[in-house]
Image (cartoon, rainbow, N blue to C red):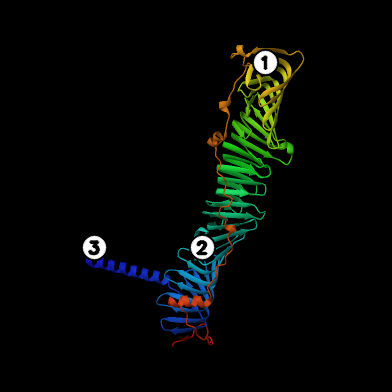
Amino acid sequence: MTIRFFLTSVFWILIFSLTGEAFAQQSSTLEINKADLLRGAVGFDRLLGNVEMKHQNSLIYCDSAHFYRAENRAQLFGRVRIKDVEDPITTTSTYAEYDGNTKVAKLRNNVVFTNQETTLYTDYLDYNRETNVATYFNDGKVVDSTNVLTSERGVYEVNFERITFRQNVILVNPDYTMKTNNLIYLTIPKTSETKGLTNIVSKEGYKLDAQNGSFYDTQQKQFRFFDGIVETEESRIKAQELFYDETKAYYEGKEDVRVLNKERQVEVYGDNGKYWEDRKYSLIYGNALVRKYFEKDTLFMTADTLISQDSEADTARYLLAFNSIKLTKADLAGIADSLVYNYADSSIRLFQDPVMWNQKSQISADSMIFYIANEELDRVYMKDKAFSIMTDTLLNYNQMKGREMTGYFVEGQMDRLIIEGNGESLYFALEADTLTQGVNRILSANIKLTFQDGAIRKANFGIRPDGKFTPVQKIDEKVSRLDGFNWRIEEKPDRAAIDAWRKPVEIDLDAENLFNDPDVKIEMPTEEQIQEKLGKSGLVPIKTMLVPLPKKGNQIEVELL
């Protein structure tokens, strides 16, 4: 290769490079398509009447403009419209500034930004055509086919069809109204995601609140709340993560789930849960807990799994509990493997080695049913291997057993006991409630006993009872115990045992709610304030009397000052 050829090649490479740069610069230059009048001024050109300019893929229309040719920017006045010839985006306003170098349009006053079905209304909008990002501040409103969203500030990322709303965000659609301070809305799938406190009120008056944000598919009508609460007229549901399908009326919660039935005054807790609103059916599992609220007292119950059915029919209202049953109330406590609570008659059925304690008595059987009336233990029915133990004033163990037993309570204490089938009774005879005389042991098919402070006061036996009295001097372990005796007081649950299983954290019903805040209208600046602000930045438009001149064909008349 000769030196001359090498230098020639370098020369043409430089020429092509410079030409490419010039072409690139030219492609980003604002161009004048037409105007009724073009007048020169110091540092800029005045375009007057039916102005049309072009920048890359955008056509710019306005009533008049100041074109700073050297700076490649323009100020646009009156009926401003910027239309993208390739994308379905059109922006209108009464004033705008357009920079051809940065590709940023600053639109002010009555701004309308339209992208297919989505329209943004505001008075202050900066639109970067390079990144296709529109930013508004000092109030804006976005409307599409489903929702209306308003906020103080927002960013519309057109390429991603994503709008980020900040400060005093309100989303309104036909089904609900949402308030938050940080919301991301995707215009194509019509989904919204919030950060931080989020409050929703449905058209039916339901309240849906989240402390740590939410996600909502507005078309599928599916919500997901974080540290959320859904409250209706009949129920209140809370979870660390709460999913709600409005169409199916279905809830699903994860971590610290709780469901309150307001009518029944029953609240259930668990690690996870599901609730079908139409069926009023709930499933709670994982360290489950029940609180049944009475006027004077509360019944607590633990289980591995809870199923609640609250149908319209009285016979179909129940609560099922499985495995590790423990329950406690002021006047009773109990354990069992499984349980059925019937809402209609306030009966509780216990299965598989159930044991109940109330004050001075312990009862056990293969299965049992006890009933609550006027918020107190009313009666209990025990079936198969029924065994009752009561302590008297001297802490002796009075014992009864039989195939079936029915016990009746007064003010929380055993008042009378009826034994049917293979009845056996062992009770201590006392003198003035201070001295044990001996032990009575009686066998009878049927036995009826009445008590006072745990001591037997009266006994009625069936036909031909078989009885034996043992004086105190001859009482030993064998004489003082019926077969099957097992005093299990160490298994009796209390509130400490309930709290160790799951200790409910009370809901703060006075927590912050954006619907409680008064609606404040942000005052928009006046035209004079806008002009003053623009003046301080050196962007005040020069007001000129417009004198229309006759056109000469397609030529633009130029008048130099």
Quickly name the residue at label 3.
1
Q: Residue 49 location, x and y as percent?
A: 53, 81
- Mark 3 lies on a secondary structure that is loop
Side of 47 relative to 312 (left or right): left
The kind of residue tagged 3 is: Met
Which residue lies under the disc numbered 1?
A: 440
Q: Nearer the viewer, mark 2 or mark 1?
A: 1
Q: Does residue 546 appear to the left or right of 283 in the view shown?
A: left
Q: Position of residue 319 (x, y in %)?
A: 66, 36
Task: Verify CB contact (< 8 Å) between mark 3 and mark 2.
Answer: no
Seen from the viewer's position, the closer of residues 129 and 75 is 75
Image quadrant in which the C terminus is located:
bottom left
Rounded to the nearest whole Å, what is the CA distance between mark 3 and mark 2?
A: 62 Å
Q: Residue furthest left?
A: 3
Location of residue 440 (image quadrant): top right
In contact (CB < 8 Å): disc 2 and disc 1: no
Location of the N terminus (image quadrant) = bottom left
Tag 1: amino acid: Asn
Q: Secondary structure at mark 2?
A: strand
Q: Residues within 10 Å of mark 3 (few under 14, many from 20)?
A: few
Q: Is residue 545 above or below residue 320?
A: below
- The answer to which of marks 1 and 3 sits earlier in the sequence is 3
Could you tell which of marks 2 and 1 lies nearer the N-terminus? 2
Identify the residue position indicated by label 2 in the image: 154
The answer to whether the residue labelled 1 contacts the one labelled 3, judged by CB atoms less than 8 Å apart, is no
Counting from the top left corner in percent of width and height, residue 559 is at 46, 87
Front disc: 1 or 3: 1
